[in-house]
Amino acid sequence: MDINNSVALVTGANRGLGRAFAQCLLERGARKVYATARRPESVDLPGVVALPLDIADPASVRAAAEAAPDVSLLVNNAGIQTGTDLVTGSLDAVRHEMETNMFGHLGMIREFAPALARNGGGAIVNVLSAMSWFGAKGAGAYHLAKAAAWAMTNGVRLELAEQGTLVTAVHLGLADTDMAAGWPVDKIAPSDLAAAALDGVEAGSAEVLADQWSRDIKSRLPLTPEEFYAAMDRALAALTAA
Ligand SMILES: NC(=O)c1ccc[n+]([C@@H]2O[C@H](COP(=O)([O-])OP(=O)(O)OC[C@H]3O[C@@H](n4cnc5c(N)ncnc54)[C@H](OP(=O)(O)O)[C@@H]3O)[C@@H](O)[C@H]2O)c1
């Protein structure tokens, strides 16, 4: 996948990682960048095409697909973290995280897959998380939604292989955005995250582990749950002590 001359669409492009993706795409010579947001007037990057899009609203997703039929690179970035526990938290909030972080991304893929096929196969970037692989108190719903989105990503990669669409999963620990503002620790810069993800797309990679945190956690997956969560407790204690 050549970013230069591609036509890209980024969800949640008004701030955080989405804005960094849009900027990085422009810098790498994308021919057109649709910078989508629930409030398109909040998109402040010169040189992009701002479009309204709420990924949790199927009618809005369909309207965006109709408005942007030339897309060859879809960056599924928009997401939420509501801080909801699975057992005692609001079930509506758990569902809301699934609707946004998993079904929202899947809905985008379903609507845009025909355009990607028409435009030569193209690529999809799904911004996931190291929390696709671990749960934590206060983030049970987020873990559930990101784990489901990881499985969804692996599934659609198989289904879209025939039409030549690359599907790249991007995992990260913490990035320096509003979402991680409550964590006063070292975080990857949004521009570095976007660059690593787009390097992965250009290399044809199915997976990008963008920081050491995501690489460490993935490497622990063969552990038993007891060993895995003991290692997580140590890693989280070290992170917050640093
Ligand atoms: N920051 C981190 O440490 C971190 C770590 C791992 C993974 N991630 C993932 O990275 C992605 C981007 O997160 P971020 O850090 O940039 O978060 P952020 O700063 O909180 O920005 C979230 C973006 O998603 C948009 N959004 C939320 N719900 C939406 C919806 N229904 N439709 C359209 N847009 C919606 C927001 O739009 P509004 O401005 O309208 O709210 C905003 O543009 C997310 O998928 C997140 O889960 C982030």
Image: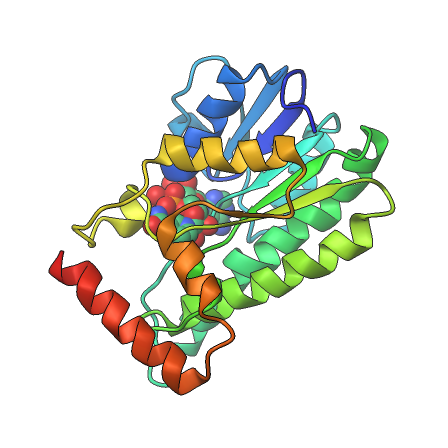
Quadrant of the image occupied by residue 51: top right
Q: Which of 87 and 192 is in front in this view?
A: 192
Q: Is residue 19 above or below residue 100?
A: above
Quadrant of the image occupied by residue 228: bottom left
Q: In this view, does 87 lie above or below 34?
A: below
Instruction: Give how far across and how far down residue 202 sits, in percent.
Output: 63, 30
In the rendered image, the quadrant that contains the N terminus is: top right
Quadrant of the image occupied by residue 138: bottom left
Instruction: Tell whether 43 sits left or right of 189.
Output: right
Q: Nearer the viewer, residue 235 or 131?
A: 235
Instruction: Tell whether 220 sits left or right of 190.
Output: right
Q: Is residue 228 above or below residue 168?
A: below
Instruction: Give how far across and how far down residue 17 sits, in percent.
Output: 41, 38
Q: Looking at the image, how many numbered discs can be counted on the residues?
A: 0
Q: Which of 81 and 123 is in front in this view?
A: 123
The residue sitting at 41% across, 30% down in the picture is 20
The residue sitting at 74% across, 33% down in the picture is 122
Q: Is residue 46 above or below residue 224?
A: above
In the rendered image, the quadrant that contains the C terminus is: bottom left
Instruction: Give how far across and how far down residue 206 sits, in percent.
Output: 65, 48
The residue sitting at 74% across, 50% down in the picture is 110
Residue 15 visible from this viewpoint: no
Residue farthest to the left?
Answer: 241
